[in-house]
């Protein structure tokens, strides 16, 4: 839902983009089913080895969905949504414009929502702290998308979204 709103705030009123975002967001975590249950439910931060194993969920998702013709760049979006603008993401270490717009939008939406929810190893972040993380340098996230998020959060619809997210 947030990814769709961000696209609209970016002025990208495109049905194909909306469909790509909605489909990719819905299917992006399908690869998690191949990961060990104890890894997914671990209390506390992951070790470097566990983090590498967790990152495999992208490859597993792409493998599971490869034969489906979505008619949209859904697979590319899923494969790239964990890439980062500075090249620090995964699985391919893409950077900047090599990452498709849909994936850059989903990266911001996914990270913001994750930061706003508590984890077993940390408390939830408030909205200003989550935005500050998305603005850390070197930039990991597309700052135009982060700007769209900040603007959306100031709107009545954005405030309502945050309230729902925090429930």
Image: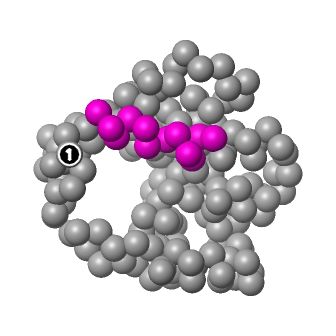
Asked if 117 appears above or below 98 in the picture, the reply is below
Asked if 35 appears above or below 46 in the picture, the reply is above
On the image, the x and y values in percent for residue 137 come to 45, 61
Seen at 48% across and 53% down, the residue is 140
Q: Is residue 29 magenta?
A: yes
Seen at 40% across and 78% down, the residue is 125
Which quarter of the picture shows residue 155?
bottom right
116 with respect to 3 (left or right): left
The magenta stretch spans which residues?
23-34
63 with respect to 85 (left or right): left
The crowd level at tag 1 (other Cα within 10 Å; few <14, some 14-19, many 20+) is: few
The answer to whether residue 58 of the structure is visible from this angle is no
Residue bearing the label numbered 1: 37
From the image, give the main secondary structure of the stretch colored magenta. Answer: helix
| Closest to the observer, 159 or 26 | 26
Q: Secondary structure at mark 1?
A: helix
Q: Is residue 32 magenta?
A: yes
Seen at 30% across and 78% down, the residue is 123
On the image, the x and y values in percent for residue 139 come to 50, 56
Q: Residue furthest top?
A: 67
Seen at 44% across and 24% down, the residue is 64
Which quarter of the picture shows residue 74?
top right
Point out the image quarter for the N terminus. bottom right
């Amino acid at each position: 839902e947030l990814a769709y709103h961000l696209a609209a705030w970016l002025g990208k009123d495109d049905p194909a983009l909306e469909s790509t975002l909605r489909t990719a967001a819905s299917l992006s975590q399908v690869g998690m089913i191949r990961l060990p249950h104890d890894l997914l439910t671990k209390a506390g931060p992951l070790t470097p080895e566990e983090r590498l194993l967790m990152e495999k969920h992208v490859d597993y998702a792409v493998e599971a969905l490869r034969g489906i013709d979505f008619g949209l760049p859904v697979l590319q979006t899923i494969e790239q949504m964990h890439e980062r603008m500075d090249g620090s993401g995964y699985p391919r270490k893409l950077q900047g414009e090599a990452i498709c717009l849909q994936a850059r939008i989903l990266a911001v939406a996914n990270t913001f929502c994750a930061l706003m929810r508590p984890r077993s190893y940390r408390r939830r972040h408030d909205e200003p702290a989550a935005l500050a993380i998305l603005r850390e340098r070197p930039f990991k996230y597309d700052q135009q998308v982060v700007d769209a998020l900040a603007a959306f959060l100031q709107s009545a619809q954005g405030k309502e979204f945050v309230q729902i997210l925090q429930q």
